[in-house]
């Protein structure tokens, strides 16, 4: 379950940022999670609940935004929505496409007091 290490890293990053700004608490955190990132959302939510206990984030509301997958064909440059990491182009059928969106996992915003 790599979601626990992800959650732990997120908490560390947020705590460092809050400390640098001399914040007393974190009130809100927004995360962007790509649909093709390999993260199991329920596992991440559970891991975050555990990771924030007894931290400056313990009462923060955490919002998760799923970023849909988008692929781009290497042959015709067509862009299309995808739920699979490897999918042929929907326009020309070319087997090689690049995932241009949906692999990310990032902190979108942190609200502090």
Image (cartoon, grey):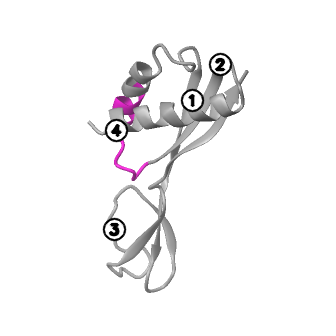
Residue that badge 2 annotates: 25
Residue that badge 3 annotates: 87
Evaluate whether residue 89 shows in this view: no
* Residue at 49%, 30% in the rendered image: 11
Q: Which mark is residue 15?
A: 1
* Residue at 39%, 53% in the rendered image: 36
- Which mark sits nearer the N-terminus, 2 or 1? 1
- Which mark sits nearer the N-terminus, 2 or 4? 2
- SS at mark 3 in the image: loop
* Residue at 41%, 82% in the rendered image: 92
The Cα–Cα distance between marks 3 and 4, rounded to whole angstroms, is 20 Å
**Disc 2 packing (10 Å; few <14; some 14–19; many ≥20):** some
Pointers 2 and 3 in contact (CB under 8 A)? no
Across and down, in percent, residue 19 comes to 64, 28
Across and down, in percent, residue 41 comes to 39, 35
- Which mark sits nearer the N-terminus, 3 or 4? 4
Residue that badge 4 annotates: 40
């Amino acid at each position: 379950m790599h979601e626990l290490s992800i959650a732990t890293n997120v908490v560390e990053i947020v705590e460092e940022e809050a400390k640098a700004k001399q914040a007393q608490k974190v009130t809100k955190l927004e995360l962007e999670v790509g649909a093709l990132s390999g993260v199991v959302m329920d596992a991440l939510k559970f891991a975050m609940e555990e990771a924030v206990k007894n931290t400056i984030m313990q009462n923060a509301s955490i919002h998760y935004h799923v970023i849909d997958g988008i692929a781009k064909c290497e042959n015709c440059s067509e862009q299309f929505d995808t739920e699979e990491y490897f999918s042929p182009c929907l326009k020309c059928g070319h087997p090689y496409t690049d995932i241009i969106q949906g692999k990310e996992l990032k902190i979108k915003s942190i609200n502090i007091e």
